[in-house]
Amino acid sequence: MAKESIVAHNRQGTELKEPATRVLLIESDPTQAGNLSHALVASGYEVAIAETAEVGVELASNYHPDAILLGQHGPQTEQGIELCARLKAAPDLAKVPVLVFDQSGARSYDDRALEAGIEEFIPTLEGAEGTLVRLKRVLRKHHLIEQLQTELDAAEREREMLRQTKESLACNYQQLQAQLERLKEENEKLRELDRVKSGFISMVVHDIRSPLTVIVGTLDLLREELATGRPIDYHYYQRLFDESLRNCQEIARLIDDMLTLAQIGERRLVLNFEPTTMNEIVEEAVQVAAGAARQAEVTLSCEIAAGLPLVYVDRKQMHRALMNLVNNAIKFTPAGGRVTIQARLLEEKRRDAPCDYVLLSVVDTGEGLAPEEAPYVFDAYWQASNGKWKTGTGLGLAIVKRIAVAHGGNASVRSQLGKGSTFTIMIPVREGPPTGTVELTE
C-alpha cells in the first residue's frame, strides 16, 4: 500500500495584504505535484498537496480550499467523477470549483462529470502556465458569482424589508383610517350630545322658571295684601297655594331626577335588596298616583296575577322606577283615557334562561310613539316629538332603564302611534338577594 502524505507550501518572505487563495492539489506524482505547487506558490497561492484521493477528501474538509485540482496521473475517468462527487457532498465544499487535469481535456468525460460538479478540464499539454490561466479564470468567475450572489441577497433582504415596511405602512394606514372613523363618530356623538345637553339646559331653565313664576307671583301678591292690610281671601289663595305646592313638587322632582342620574353615572347610588311582593309595589304606586290621575281625568287601575313569587328589589328605587312610568303614562294620556299597572309571571326556564321574571308593566291609552322613536325612548335627555310641549326633561325613562338593569333585568316598550304604549320592567325571580352590593351602572 502506498504511503499517504500531506505537503503544504506557501511563498516564503512574501507579505500579503489579504489571506492567500488556498488551492488543494490531489496529485499522486510527486514530480508533477512539485512543479505545479511551485508555480502556484510563485503566483501567490497557498497550496496543500494530497497524494491520494482518501487523504484529499479528508484534508479538504479541514483545509477549506478556494479551489481543488485533481492531478492527471490520479484516478481514471470513473474514479475522477466519483471523487468529485464525494468532495461536493460536503456542505462547505459544494461551491468550491473543481478543476481536472486530463490528457484530452473534456473529451474523456460525459454529462456525468458536469452533474458531479467538475467545473474545468485542463489539457495536460497546457502545463503550469495554462493551469494558472484557467485557475485564475475559474476563481475570477466564482468571485464574481459570489459578489453577485451577495448583491442579490442584499437586494432580496432590502426587497423583504421594503415589503414588510409596505405592509406595516398599509396596516398603520388602515389603523389610522379606522381610528379616524372612530374619532369622527365620537366627534359627531359629542356634537349631538352637546346639542342635546344645550336643549336639555334650555328645558331645565324653562321647567324651573315657569313654576317659579307662579310661586313668586303668589308670594308677591300675598306680601302686597299683608302690606296694605287688606283682608285676605282664603278661598282664592287656597287655589294659588295648591298650584304653588304642585310647582314646588315638580321642581323638587326635576332636581331629584338630575341628582339620581348623576349618581348613577358616577356609580355612587347603591341598591339594598329586600324580599317584596308585587302587591306592595303596585298598591303603593296606585295610592301615590291617584291624585295626579284624578286631576288629569284619567282612570288608574291595576291587574295583579295570582300567586306571584317574592322578588328581591330595592323598594325605594323600584317604586321610583314604577312611578316614573305611571307619571309618564298619565302625562301623555288624554282625559277620559286609562292607565293600568299590570304584574304577571314570565316563565323562562323552559327556554333555558337563567330564571323566571316578573313583568311589571304600565299600559296607557295615550298618544303612543312613532316606530322610529321607540329605540331612543330610554336615552337620557331625549323626548318624543309629541312631548315637546309637555313639561319634563327626558330623564325619567333613562332612570327607569338603569334601575331595571341594576336589578338584573331590563326595561322595554311596545307602542303604536295614536293608540298608546306599554312600558315593562323585567324583574328576575331569585331564591335570595344578590351577593354583595349591586351598584347602578350606565
Image (cartoon, rainbow, N blue to C red):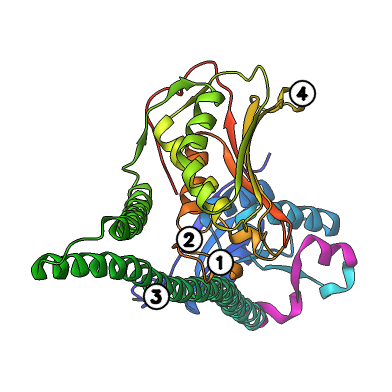
Q: Residue 338 location in percent, x, y?
A: 65, 47
Q: Residue 177 location in percent, x, y?
A: 55, 76
- Pick whichever of labels 4 and 3 is earlier in the sequence: 3
Mark 3 crowdedness (10 Å alpha carbons): few <14, some 14-19, many ≥20: few
The residue under the point 25% across, 70% down is: 217
Q: Give the amino acid type for the residue marked by disc 3 in the picture.
A: Ser
- Pick whichever of labels 3 and 1 is earlier in the sequence: 3
Q: CA distance from mark 1 to mark 4?
A: 40 Å
Residue 345 lies in what quarter of the image? top right
Foreground of the two, 194 or 311 = 311
Residue 135 lies in what quarter of the image? bottom right
Q: CA distance from mark 2 to mark 1?
A: 9 Å
Secondary structure under tag 3 reads helix
Which numbered disc, 2 or 4, marks the residue closer to the eye? 2
Question: Marks 3 and 4: in contact by CB < 8 Å?
Answer: no
Image mark for residue 387: 1
Mark 4 crowdedness (10 Å alpha carbons): few <14, some 14-19, many ≥20: few
- Pick whichever of labels 3 and 2 is earlier in the sequence: 3
Q: Residue 133 location in percent, x, y?
A: 64, 84
- Pick whichever of labels 2 and 4 is earlier in the sequence: 4
Q: Which region shows up in magenta?
A: 110-130
